[in-house]
Image (cartoon, rainbow, N blue to C red):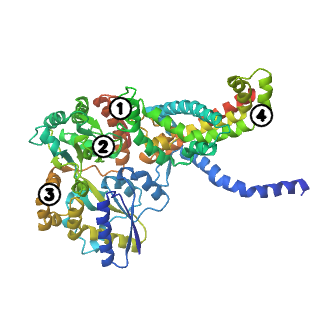
Amino acid sequence: MKVTFWHGMESGVNNQVLEAKIREFERRNPKIHIDAQVYGAADQLGPKLDAAVAGGTPPDLLWWAPAFFPRYAEAGVLRSLDDLMAQDPSFDHGDVYPFLWELGSYKGRVYTSPFSVNNLAVYYNKKMFREAGIAEVPRTWPELREAARRLTRDRVFGFEIPIGTAEWTVWTWQCFLWQAGGELLSPDARRAAFHHRAGIEALDFWRALKDDGSATFSETDAGYKTDGFLAGRVAMTINGPWNYPLLRDQDAVEVGAFPLPSGERAATNCGGESLFLFKSEPARERAAFAFMTFVTSADFQVDWAIQSGYLPVSKSASQSPTYRAFLEKNPFLAVFDEQMAAGRVRPSIPQYPALSATLGKHLEAALYGRRSSKEALERAAVEVDALLQ
Amino acid sequence: MSAHGRDTRTAYLFLLPALLPLAVFVLYPVVNLLWTSLHRSDILRNELTFLGLANYRALFAGEDFGRAAWNTLYYVAATVPLGMAVSLGLALLLNTEIRGLGLLRTMVFTPVVTSAVAAGIVFVWLLDERGPASALLALFGVKAQRWLQSEVWAMPAVVLMSVWKQAGYNMVLFLAGLQAIPETYYEAAALDGAGSPWRAFRHVTWPLLWPTTFFVLVMSVIQAFRAFEPMYVMTRGGPVGSTTTLVYFIFDRAFKYGDMGQAAAASVLLAVVVLGITWVQFRVRRDA
């Protein structure tokens, strides 16, 4: 039985780790062959997947951010997991963080099973901090702004603003929206809520960093790339734990991480990837689900987390002595682990991709100074309201 | 049945192998496009909800479509004349007997056969703040910047890449046109006093090359209206939509927003515009 599995792990090390785990799964399940294929940047998957679905050739399993699944659930191409989980005694539903099931549910059914979680924090260049005489990492917005100013020198910027219209920009900006006390949508998810005071403050804060001359734009639509940071062109950048192997295996920059600064409150955006199961035939669906069970097991979660830097999805894995000992030795990853407490998630609604594209477009216009933050967000809200109707 | 009727039927039978693919791959998609443009349509689902002309109205009500139309005109108006001038210039230069001519022509033609994506990525690198373009311009006192992240310079950069990529192809067409002009005309012109290269070009080359020039013009305009790869690879339509041309807009609507109806409506409008402009070009040519 061949199960096609699309994923977007571009980093070489993570890819090797995944391949090894897949071989392990195949040894335990000799009748199943996992055909893993890399689809490239996760932010750019939408068009490819839509074309595959429209053409009737989606993968069996897909590794992607859960925020994107409801559109496919609504279209009726995803297999819901409730009965599969109930039938499989080895699938430990209760061990996984409840918010992940909430995130993976749409209209009362579970559609995705978590693969790994992560959240956003700030990477910083320790050497540059020492040279600028900054002993304590910034905890608040004003402290971050001040640090960015002090870190900026000839050809080095203190901070990097993730520019573009793609999801990365929207995803990172939401953290600041939440920190300022705002929300993306109204509680019933029928109206935009990001255009009120908190949203304006969050966007103004990014603009202030740029106006101070202490922040530069990232590569467009690619704020997740670490090139500028690792080349020593920026001292701080927002990113996640998954670059851990890459950062570990380089010695150009001495890397540290600290939690995203607080506004009114602390907040980060939890991401991570879940597995989507596309409808096919019962035998293939069961084979694909067996891989989901394997991925959720504490064994896989601990091994994967230690080797790749992603955070585990279950309590047993997160609390396992092996993982705790590992975090002791890796303060960089411990930052992300501790920050899970302040973690929030994007809404599970079918309109999310279109919402993200719309908001992204207006965020960019404001960051380029085309419009005031208020006007840009209000325009975005009008368009988002129309999407949600 | 008359002999004539039988002949006609035979003729249609012979045409069938050509007409069938045309119907399947051209006619059907066109009709389908028109039909989709009148509906709300999600790529993931096969259901259509009839909207009448609402998709068209939405295009004209929003600002993005107008912006994309304007950007398209900018792109066409910049790439077509510049591209034609460059390729004609290259053709005139390379329409001689010099050593290594084949090699030179091949070099100019190479960008045409290069993948647009690969070429685009090279241009992204060339135009980086720390790239060669900035280094070169620094010699003239121009401040280094990320050219592709500038609302002002992103479009010229995309135009530059498109011209570079297309010049070789049009050069080959011009070369063929130039070589079809008999040498005797130049000799006659020289005897009549049009001896200088400029006068020979003005009074012999240009008028006799006109059929080629016209063909290149029509094809370049159509191609420019349809441009997509340079924007997709180099700028993703940005920054702030400054390089979002109509085809990129259509792609965005269809695949980023999942709105096939509006994308189809925009495609119909683009097709109408291209058809209209091509018709005007042919009219002008006939009248000339």
Question: B137 left or right of B245?
Answer: left
Amino acid under disc 1: Ala
Who's the residue at 18% across and 38% down the image? A180
Who's the residue at 81% across and 55% down the image? B11
Who's the residue at 37% across and 75% down the image? A32
Of tags 4 and 1, the one toward the viewer is 4
x and y percent of residue A270 in the render?
23, 52
Q: Quadrant of the N terminus of chain A?
A: bottom left
Residue A116 or residue A226, whichever sits in front: A226
Which residue has dot 3 on it?
A330
Which residue has dot 1 on it?
B144
Which residue has dot 2 on it?
A170
Gap in angstroms between the C-alphas marked 3 and 1: 39 Å
Asked if residue B62 can be seen in this view, the reply is no
Q: Which mark is residue A380?
A: none
x and y percent of residue A362 in the render?
34, 35
Q: Tally the numbered discs.
A: 4
Secondary structure, mark 4, is: helix
Amino acid under disc 4: Glu
Q: Chain of mark 3?
A: A
Gap in angstroms between the C-alphas marked 2 and 3: 29 Å
Q: Which mark is residue B183?
A: 4
